[in-house]
Amino acid sequence: MSYLEFYGLNQEPFSNAPVSKFYFNSKQHSEALLRLKYAVETMKGLALLIGDIGTGKTTLARKMLDNLPEDEYESALLVIIHTGITANLLLKKIAIQIGVKDPTNDKLQLLSQLYNRLVELHECNKKAVVLVDEAQMLQTKEIMEEFRGLLNLELPEDKLLTFVFFGLPEMEDYLKLDEPLAQRVALKYSLKSFDSSSTQEYINYRLKTAGADRMLFEPDAIKAIHRQAGGIPRIINTICDNALFEGFLVKSNTIDKDTIESVAYDLGFSKDMATSEAPHVVNENVPDSGDIDDMLDSLEQK
């Protein structure tokens, strides 16, 4: 038996994978989508969504991409995975994303291909939108100048391309490497961590979406989750996932505060690490090593 079966779940409720069905439309996420959608509908050129690590930027980027109708937009999500990306490679990737066939390696010719493709899309009444996730990885003046150049690909009365950058707060500093580009930011929205109420709603939503028919965390446990995670969704997920597994090992029907405190400490998230010893949960129902081996064998057979 796995913890999913024990708690009556049909899939992991707190995976950090960006699964669209688990998207939690909090008030601020709803507001962010509304503003970013306005930016692309009106082709503002450049919009920013910033937030600290784990606040849901990537999930929001994917949700936004899913919400852009294919008959109205030529849209793509570009994920920057390394700070060493060059301007030429970036241009080629963007060209491929918006449908340029056989992009050339020659920069001037590539810009011409890009412009022609953008005009073609405009004539088909489609808007070209590129969402750039992990945009704080773009850390050179050359890269920023390249984006400014792409935003100059326009018609007398219409912009042909809009970028939406998703990144950490320091992304704004990198934009200032090219001040004219920084001045072109038409819209900015900042994601914050959840407050206590949103944390509870988030946990409840994820559990229900995974098939739970009841709340698996005690009220004090939810308060502890919010405190230890600081309202950051990614950390909430990690703590809750580990806590459910620990609860399964001791066959506990609900997760209590002590379990949360212990898990948070073991994961290095505890707010009390500098001032206290590791919390210890005593439970006479903890399985012996043989029972755990049987559980692990069961997991491997699933």
Image: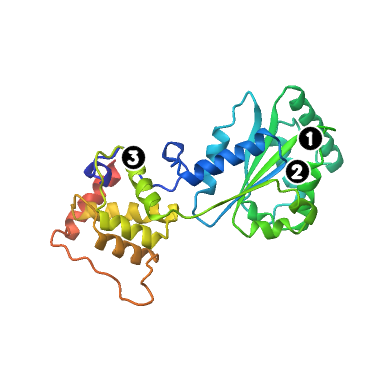
Q: Locate residue 243 relative to residue 95 in the image: left or right.
A: left
Q: Locate residue 78 relative to residue 250 in the image: left or right.
A: right
Residue 275 visible? The answer is yes
Q: Check disc 3 and give the amino acid type.
A: Gln
Q: Residue at x 77, y 51 (%)?
A: 181
Find out whether the residues at labels 1 and 2 contact each other: C-beta distance under 8 Å. yes
Judging depth in this view, the residue of 80 and 28 nearest the camera is: 28
Q: Check disc 2 and give the amino acid type.
A: Leu
Residue for badge 2: 91
Marks 2/3: CA–CA distance: 39 Å
Quarter of the figure that contains the C terminus: top left
Q: Which label is found at residue 114?
A: 1
- Secondary structure under tag 1 reads helix
Q: Residue at x 37, y 62 (%)?
A: 227
Where is residue 78 drawn, in percent x and y? Answer: 63, 43
- Secondary structure under tag 3 reads loop
Residue for badge 3: 11
Q: Which label is found at residue 140?
A: none
